[in-house]
Amino acid sequence: MEKKQTIGIDLGGTKFHVGIVSEQNEIIGETQRYSSRHAKSADELLDSLANGVLETLDINGKTLSDIGGVGIGSPGPLDPYSGKILNTLNLKVFRNFPLKRKLEKKLGISVFVDNDANCFALGEQRGGEARGKKHVMAITLGTGFGFALIINGEILHGATGTATEIARIPYLDGEYEDFISGRGLAKMYKNLSGKTKKPEDIGEGALHGDAFCIETFAEFGSHLAMTLVPLVSAFDPEILVVGGSIAANWEYFSPALEETLRPYLFEPIRKNLIIAKSQLGECATIVGAAGLIHSKFSI
């Protein structure tokens, strides 16, 4: 019997989210959330991941024998070729940790690991807003700034597997992530209002008509556009998909993103480019991570 169902894991610094994904790139049954924040060692977090997989299968009436493999979307940088987590800031216990090899040994099935932004892009391309597109640019806006490219249907990894790790590219008086992130949003709000707000509270304020919050998102959208001008111009994607927690405020920053970005683009790109909010939301990374197995094998 062919095993078409796979497990996808969205691994973050505070929690991880596990789901079973069908061959049609749809979540099957219930997904489960687990804490990663309190793990004191790599082995402790590894055990949590393995137990999370087994529990998710059990809750949905399945076993490891029903599954073709496990895919993990993890904060980078990492080596997707070996499945080793490198010097990531968000998962300190997993620094320089051979996650693929260790989890395969524990579960006895194939495991693949890739950057969480890459998995987000793959999820949207397989089952979301970018379905059927071969040239996809995807960004995630949250605590940090994630970026991914699919070119001719394949994730761009580069020679070392760390292509598209662009958060530290110099921009104005800092780096991309100093502006295009939750902390960047909070800093813009403080500069405009003289007050302090958390990113989620800025979104709430915009919803209730707070002028400073609305202006903050407009400024954020303009900065996002300027960081993307050279990238969109260089890679000519069919679609730019935007996800992450800040994307919940799409209506407040997307007009400035569109209005600032498009005038700088070469006319064919300007006319062809679709700019869209993620369709799958928080499930995109799970779907994309599970899709890593389908990308490697005909299972």
Image (cartoon, rainbow, N blue to C red):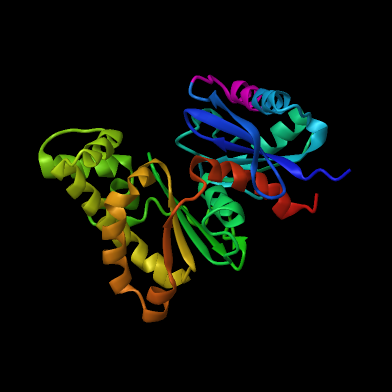
First to last magenta residue range: 38-49
- Name the magenta segment's main secondary structure: helix
Residue shown at the point (20%, 47%) measured from the top left: 214
* Residue 226 percent coordinates (x, y): 29, 62
The vertical placement of 225 against 84, above or below, is: below
The vertical placement of 272 against 60, above or below, is: below
Residue in front for this viewpoint, 197 or 206: 206
46 within the magenta span: yes
276 within the magenta span: no
Q: As drawn, which residue projects farthest toward the bottom? A: 267
Residue in front for this viewpoint, 95 or 271: 271
- Asked if residue 171 can be seen in this view, the reply is no
Q: Is residue 41 left or right of residue 55?
A: left
- Residue 224's image quarter? bottom left
Residue in front for this viewpoint, 74 or 18: 18
* Residue 130 percent coordinates (x, y): 53, 59
The vertical placement of 99 against 268, above or below, is: above
The vertical placement of 75 against 48, above or below, is: below
Residue in front for this viewpoint, 175 or 3: 3
* Residue 269 percent coordinates (x, y): 41, 75
What quarter of the picture does the N terminus occupy?
top right
Residue shown at the point (18%, 49%) measured from the top left: 215
- Asked if residue 204 can be seen in this view, the reply is yes
- Residue 266's image quarter? bottom left
Q: As drawn, which residue projects farthest toward the left? A: 194
* Residue 278 percent coordinates (x, y): 46, 51
Residue shown at the point (28%, 37%) measured from the top left: 199
Q: Is residue 157 left or right of residue 222?
A: right
Residue shown at the point (54%, 67%) measured from the top left: 135
